[in-house]
Image (cartoon, helix red, strand yellow):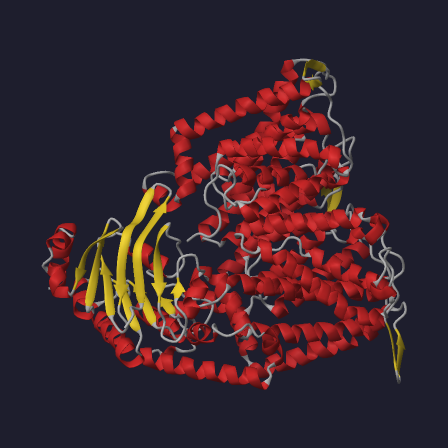
Amino acid sequence: MVAIGYTMVYGVLRLINFAHSEIFMIGGFTGFFVLKYSIGSSTPTGFSSILFIILGILAGGIAGGFSAVVLERVAYRPLRKRGAPKIAYLISAIGASYFLINIAAKEFGRIGQSMVQPYIDHPIATIFGAPIQMYTVIILIVASLMFFGLDRIVSVTKLGRGIRAVAQDSETASLMGVNIDKTIAVTFLLGGFLGGVAGFLYALNFGVLYSMGFTPALKAFTAAVLGGIGNLRGAVLGGLILGVVESLSVSFVNPAYIDVVAFAILILVLMFRPTGILGERLGRDA
Amino acid sequence: MENLFDVSGVSLRFGGVVSLSNVSMFQKRGEILAVIGPNGAGKTSLFNSLTGVYQPQEGTILFNPKEKPQLSIIGKKPFVVSDSGVARTFQASRMFNALTTFENVKIGAESHKGIGVLGAMFRGPATRRDEHTSDEHTWSLLEFVGLKERANIIASALSYGERRRLEIARGLATNPEVLLLDEPAAGTNPSEKNELADLIRRVRDEMGVSILLIEHDMKLVMSLAERLYVLNFGSVIAEGTPDEIRSNQNVIDAYLGTASEEETDNA
Amino acid sequence: MKFVGVLFILSELTAVITGPPGNPTHQFDGFKGSISQATSLLGLVTAPRWIVFFVYGILVSLIVYLLRTKKEVVSKALELQRSASSNKNLRRIFFSAVVILVVLLPTLVKDAFWQNAMVSQIAVFVLLALGLNVVTGFAGLLDLGFVAFYAVGAYATAWCTGALPLPALFGLHLNTFYAIPIAIALAMISGIILGIPTLRLRGDYLAIVTLGFGEIITVFANNLNGVTGGAMGTAQVPHFAIHLGPLNYDWGIPPVPYYYLTIVFVGIFMIAFSLLEHSRVGRAWTAIREDEVAAESVGINPLKYKVLAFAIGAASAGFAGVMTAAQTNYVTPATFTLGLSINVLVLVIFGGMGSIIGVVFGAVAIQTVTMYLIHNPPAGYQPQDLYMYIGALLVIMMIFRPAGMIPSRRRSRTHASSVSGQE
C-alpha cells in the first residue's frame, strides 16, 4: 500500500522539529518545495537506474539542508539572540514560509508538473493480493535508512547528545560547553536534509507544485503529535498510523475530505492526549 | 479550631524523579509558618502543589477558609485556588512588566468578580462603582507596602526590593487568608531584609493574613517564623519552633556546612 | 568584505523578487530575466538588472551609513517626534485633522476604482485588522484561521437573506441590515466553539490548529453544495436598505454610502475596543500575555479570557463579512483563503500589535499600496506576487521592529523604561 510508503515520509519529515519544539514546522515547506531544484539536476532523459534515484535524493537532500540552514540564519537566529517570545518565531516562520512559497510560485510557475521518472514503475511483488509498486519499495528503503541513521546519530554521537541537551535545557547545555549556534545549525541541516529527501520522494509520485509542501507538512505535524513530539520513533509510528487511517478513509469518505480527516485527528489528539502515544509533556512551561 | 491547611501523605513525582514523598503538614490560622531545607528539597514543589500548579499523585490537601467552603486543592486549577483565598509570590518576581505598579495590584483586586465585558465597554454605574472600589483598595495596599510614590511607574522599572513588595501587594489585593511567600528575601540587602520582615509581620498582625514562607536566610526565618518544617529530598525531616529546629540533629546534618556558612556570613 | 558579499546577495535577491516571473517550462527564465534584463539606472543609463540593483544596494547602504554617523540629525528628528506625540494639544489637532480627512475622503477621491477599493478592500481590512488585533495584539494568541470568522459572517448574511441553498430560519428573508446582529452573533459563537477546545494549547500548537480549522472551513464551504452553494458561491445577497418609518434609504450599488456606513462602524469598534483595552478585561489580557502562570495565581481564569478574546475578535470579522456580502452582493469560498489570514496578520504586525491606531494605520497603508499595485502594476509584477512581499515583510518586521510601526503605548512603555530606567 502506497500509504505506508508515504507515511514514513511524513514521520521522517517531522523529525526536523525534534530538537526544538518551539520552532514551527516550516522546515517541511522548505524541504518540499526546494526539492524542485532536483528537477534541474536530473535531466529529462533518464531511464531506470538506481543512479538517478540516488542523484535525486542527494540533490534534494542537500538543497533542503542548505536552505534550512540559511533559513535559520536569517529568520530565527536574530530572534534567538534577542530572546524574543515564542510567538515571534512563529510569525517569522510563517512569513518566511509564505515568502518562499510565493517566490517559488513566481519563478517556477503556478502549474503543477510531474517529475521525470528515473525508473520504470511497475509492480515488483504482491502481498496479500495488493501489488507493491517500485515506488513504495524505494520509499521504504530510503525512509528506513534515514530513520536508522538518524536514530544512531542522535543516540550515539556527541553531536546527537548535544542536540538532546539543547532541546531540554539550552542554558545548561551552553554552560557545559555545547556550542548552541552550531548545534542548532546542524539540527536544521539534518532536518532540512531529511525534508528535502522526503520532498524528492514525494515529488516522484505526485509531481511538484509551489504549494506542495503545505498539506504534507501539516500532516507530518499531525503524525509527529500523534506519535509524540520530540520522539523519533514516535514520529515514525505516528506517520504509519496516520497513513493507514488515511488510506482506509478513502473508501468511506468523500475524497475531498481526506485532508479534513488528518486535521480532525490533529485536533482530537491535541485535545485529549497532547503528549501523543510515546511522547513527552506538552502544554505549559511551568 | 480547624487548621488553615491540612496536608497529608502528599507525594509528587515527575517521571522518575520524586519531588515530594509522603509529606504531611498543617498550618494554623494566623500563624507565620516557614518551610526550609537545602536546595532541591521540594519546597517550591510544595508551594506549587498547595496552589494547584502541580498535581500530586498521592495524598490530600485541604484548605479551610473562614467564610468559604472547604476546598480540596489537588486537581483544582490555580485560579480556583486563588479565588478560595490562597495568594502566592514567586521565587523570581513575576511581574506584569507592561503594566504600571498600580495596574499590577489592581489586577489582583478586581480578579474575583465576573468578567463584565459589557460593563467594560459601556461603563455603566455599576462598573464605575466597582472600578472605584478596586482603585481605593489598590491605593490602600500600595500605601501599606510603601509603594504609593511609585504607583505610575512601569513595573519593569522597579528595583528588586520594590518588586518583592509589589508582589506582596498584588497577592494581598485578592483578599486572601494566607499568603505564600517563596524566598521573598532572595537577593535583597540587609536593610531591605529588615523592612521585609517588618512588612511580613504587619501583614499578619494588621491584615490578619496567615503567612507560609520559604526562605534560605536563616536569620530572617528564625526571627520571623513561629513554627517551621524542614524538608530534605522531598520528605519532612523535622518540625517545631525555631529553637527546637536549631538543635535538631537531623536538620544540622542535612544542612551540614550550609547553615554554618550562612551564620558566619550573617554574623 | 563580508558586508559587500551580503549586500550583493541582498541586492540580487531584490532583483529577482521584483523581476519578471519564470514559467513552468523554462523555470530559469525568471532568474535570467531578473539578472540580465536591461533597466535604467535612475533614468540615466541602461544596464543589465544585476548591475543596476547592486548599485541601488550600494546607494542605500551609503544613505544608511550617513544617517548613522550623522547622529545629531537623526536624534533631533526623533526628539521632535517624541515631543510632538506627547504634546496633548498637537495630538488632538492631528487627530481631528485625520477625522475630517476621512469624512471628506469620498469627495476628494473620485476615481471609481479607488472608491470601490476604499470600501471593499481598505475599510473591510481595517475591520479585520481590528478584530485580529484583539486576538493577537491584546491577548497574544496567534490565530491563523481568522478568516473563518470572516467567512461565517458573510455566509450568515447570505443565509439570513435567503441567498443560500439552505433555507433561512422560518423561511424569513431578512433585510440585509437586520442580518448584521445575527451574523455577528454567529461569528462570536463560532469563536467560542473554536476557542474552548483549542485555547488550552500552547502558542505554536494553537497556531497550527487554528490554521487547520481555517482550512477545514474552506473545504466545507467549497463542498457543501447544499448548504453554502459550493464553489460557485451564493446567490444574490441584497444590498443594505432601511425602510423604517421616515427613514428610507437604499444602499444599492455605489460604494460611497457603504463607505460612510463602514466608517461609522469602524469608529464604534475602535472606541469599544479601546475602552476594552483599558478596562479590567484588557488588563487581564495583558497579564495573561505577559505571564500566564502569574496571572492564574491572582485568580485570572486564562481560558475564559482567551475565549472572550476570540469571540470579540470574531465579532469584528463577522461584521466585515456582512459588509462584504452586502456590498459585493455575493459570497464565494474563493475569498476566504489562508492567504487572507496571513494578510490580516501582516497588517496587524506592521501597524503595531496591540495598538488600535497602529493596526488601522497598518491596514490602510498596506492595503492602499496593494490596491495601487493592482491598479498600476509595474513591469513584471503579477498580483500574486503580493504574497511574496507579505511573507518577506513579516520576517523583516519580526527581526527589526517587532512592535510594529506604531507600537501600542503599553508595549512601548516596556521598551522605553528598560532602556532609560525611568518614566
Nearer to us in this view, A120 or B178 = B178
Q: Quick check: B6 left or right of C310?
A: left
Residue B253 pos. (x, y %):
13, 50
User: Which image quadrant for residue A3?
Assistant: top right
Asked if one can make out residue C76 in the rendered structure from this viewpoint, the answer is no
Quick check: C175 above or below C337?
A: below
User: Which image quadrant for residue B223?
Assistant: bottom left
Q: Quick check: A121 left or right of A26?
A: right
Q: Quick check: C240 left or right of B109?
A: right
Quick check: C9 above or below B51?
A: above
User: Which image quadrant for residue C305?
Assistant: bottom right
Q: Residue at x 33, y 43 (%)?
A: B17
Residue C343 pos. (x, y %):
69, 55
Q: Residue at x 58, y 63 (%)?
A: C137
Residue C260 pos. (x, y %):
79, 74
Q: Residue at x 37, y 79 (%)?
A: B142
Nearer to us in this view, C339 or C318 = C318
The image shows a total of numbered marks equal to: 0
Nearer to us in this view, B242 or A42 = B242
Going by the picture, which residue comes out furthest to the front?
A: B1
Asked if one can make out residue B60 in the rendered structure from this viewpoint, the answer is yes
The quarter of the image holding the C terminus of chain C is bottom left
Residue B70 pos. (x, y %):
39, 68
Q: Quick check: B216 left or right of B98?
A: left
Nearer to us in this view, C10 or B264 = B264
